[in-house]
């Protein structure tokens, strides 16, 4: 089912605390999209709930990483926020006087006519300047925060939700939406055209010819499928004048809308850090995923030995999503392209499968007997029972006590056992832990207040 939640973008200069602010807002609200346990990749996309409101929070600096050889410029961040965000938050360091870049940033944000909120971060530090120094930027809504000390975060969330509509349940759709995700020139548009069966997208040998999201609906095995082709990701240093760089928000919007994402990898340039980052984002968003090696027709060797040699390398690079299928394709020769539809339908079916509570609890008790969860000296987690609460992606809730002491490695252990019992290839699965004592305390508190 496609989602159309509002998008809130965080923009600003480097070192003002955008990513710290993002993490506070996402994790403080126990967002549905949380970082996968055990990974070191920072999130750039998080779903935040505040009262009757929900929205996607996007850290436009979240892909900025030296290892990625990629850095979005301030101008591009603003251009994307202007075009695709519903609310723009401009973050400044409250200890520094606004610079010319800050003024240009504020001017462009205001020119968008979107709601703009000025966030003065690091307000806990000595030397924090008075509000008057920032009023000349022209942004009326101004709030002070300290991401480090978690101050002002609630007030900021309250201000944001004033500018977005309350969440509403969407009607289920039987249309399966598949997004083609990847860096520029990995063959997304060619793949899109072959899958669509017609020249729906512009195809050229110039990286970045896909400027906007293209879409087309096809029918396969009595199922309506919508294909979504995204603007590509480009590494720093490979841009040419007049060519658009990576569109963070547009790509995230396509991931958000899709049920399943095909992450295309160029066979001539495999396992880049940016590919890994994109895989992490897709997994965090709870979407189905397959790794699709493209341009197999131009690979050296192209035989089974080469494929067998490459597959372990790719699997090792993406070991944080070991459940993801891998397929080698060639749009030019049509190799394995139609198999992608079959893979998508299989993943979709696995995402929708429902488990039996009895089987789940037998599995949980067996897991505890073989490997009890570790805890502190006199405090050990007690896992009492487990239920499945949702599908697409499969979501499991474990009830018990002292659950905050459950180590991430134990969650991985439970996930592995679940995957051995049920076939969840191609989809992430999510866990929530609910402490029965805390639930009881909350109910008693609510009863007292009423």
Image (cartoon, rainbow, N blue to C red):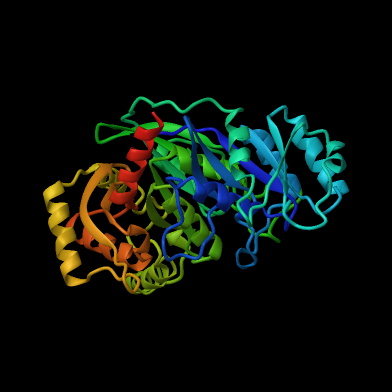
Q: Which residue is most to the front?
A: 448
Is residue 401 at least partly visible in the picture? yes
Vertical comparison of 106 with 450: above or below: below
Q: Can you say whether 398 is above or below 410 in the image?
A: above
Question: Is 82 situated left or right of 203 in this image?
Answer: right
Q: Residue 100: x and y, percent?
A: 88, 47
Residue 426 lies, in percent from the top left, at: 32, 53
Relative image position of residue 255 (x, y in whole percent): 47, 43
Residue 130 on image: x %, y %: 84, 45
- Assign the C terminus to one quadrant of the image: top left
Rendered residue at 39%/46% (across/down): 287
Q: Residue placed at 47% from the left, 29% from the top?
A: 52
**Residue 416 quadrant:** bottom left
Nearer to us in this view, 306 or 414: 414
**Residue 11 or residue 315, whichever sits in front:** 11
Q: In the drawing, does residue 446 fall left or right of residue 25? A: left
Q: Quadrant of residue 419?
A: bottom left
Give the tally of numbered discs: 0
As drawn, is 403 to the left or to the right of 64?
Answer: left
Query: Is residue 341 at least partly visible in the picture?
Result: no
Rendered-image quadrant of the N terminus: top left
The residue that appears at 14% across and 64% down in the rendered structure is: 366
Name the foreground residue: 113 vs 385. 385
């Amino acid at each position: 089912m496609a989602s159309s939640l509002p998008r809130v973008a965080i923009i600003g200069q480097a070192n003002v605390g955008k990513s710290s602010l993002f993490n506070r807002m996402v994790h403080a609200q126990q967002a549905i999209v949380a970082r996968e346990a055990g990974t070191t990749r920072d999130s750039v996309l998080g779903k935040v709930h505040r009262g009757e409101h929900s929205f996607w929070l996007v850290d436009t600096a979240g892909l900025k990483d030296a290892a990625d050889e990629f850095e979005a410029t301030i101008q591009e961040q603003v251009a994307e926020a202007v075009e695709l965000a519903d609310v723009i938050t401009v973050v400044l360091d409250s200890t520094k006087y606004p610079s010319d870049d800050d003024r240009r940033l504020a001017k462009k944000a205001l020119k968008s006519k979107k709601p703009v909120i000025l966030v003065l971060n690091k307000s806990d530090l000595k030397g924090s300047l008075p509000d008057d120094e920032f009023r000349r930027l022209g942004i009326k809504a101004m709030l002070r925060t300290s991401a480090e000390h978690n101050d002002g975060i609630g007030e900021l969330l309250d201000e944001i939700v004033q500018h977005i509509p309350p969440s509403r349940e969407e009607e289920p759709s039987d249309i399966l939406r598949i997004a083609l995700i990847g860096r520029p020139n990995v063959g997304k548009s060619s793949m899109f055209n072959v899958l669509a069966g017609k020249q729906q997208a512009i195809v050229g040998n110039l990286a970045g010819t896909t400027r906007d999201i293209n879409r087309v609906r096809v029918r396969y095995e009595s199922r309506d499928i919508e294909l979504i082709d995204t603007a590509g990701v480009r590494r720093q240093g490979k841009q040419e004048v007049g060519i658009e760089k990576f569109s963070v928000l547009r790509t995230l919007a396509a991931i958000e809308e899709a049920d399943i994402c095909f992450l295309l990898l160029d066979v001539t340039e495999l396992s880049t850090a940016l590919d890994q980052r994109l895989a992490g984002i897709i997994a965090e968003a709870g979407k189905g995923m397959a790794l699709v090696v493209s341009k197999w027709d131009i690979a050296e060797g192209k035989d089974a030995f080469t494929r067998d040699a490459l597959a372990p390398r790719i699997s090792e690079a993406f070991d944080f999503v070991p459940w993801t299928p891998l397929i080698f394709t060639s749009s030019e020769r049509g190799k394995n392209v139609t198999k992608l539809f079959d893979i998508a339908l299989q993943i979709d079916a696995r995402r929708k499968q429902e488990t039996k509570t009895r089987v789940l609890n037998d599995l949980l008790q067996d897991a505890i007997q073989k490997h009890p969860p570790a805890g502190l000296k006199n405090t050990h987690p007690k896992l009492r029972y487990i239920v499945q609460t949702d599908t697409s992606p499969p979501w499991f809730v474990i009830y018990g006590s002292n659950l905050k002491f459950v180590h991430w490695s134990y969650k991985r252990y439970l996930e592995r056992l679940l995957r051995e019992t049920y076939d969840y290839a191609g989809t992430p699965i999510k866990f929530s832990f609910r402490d029965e004592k805390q639930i009881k305390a909350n109910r008693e508190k609510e009863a007292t207040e009423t």
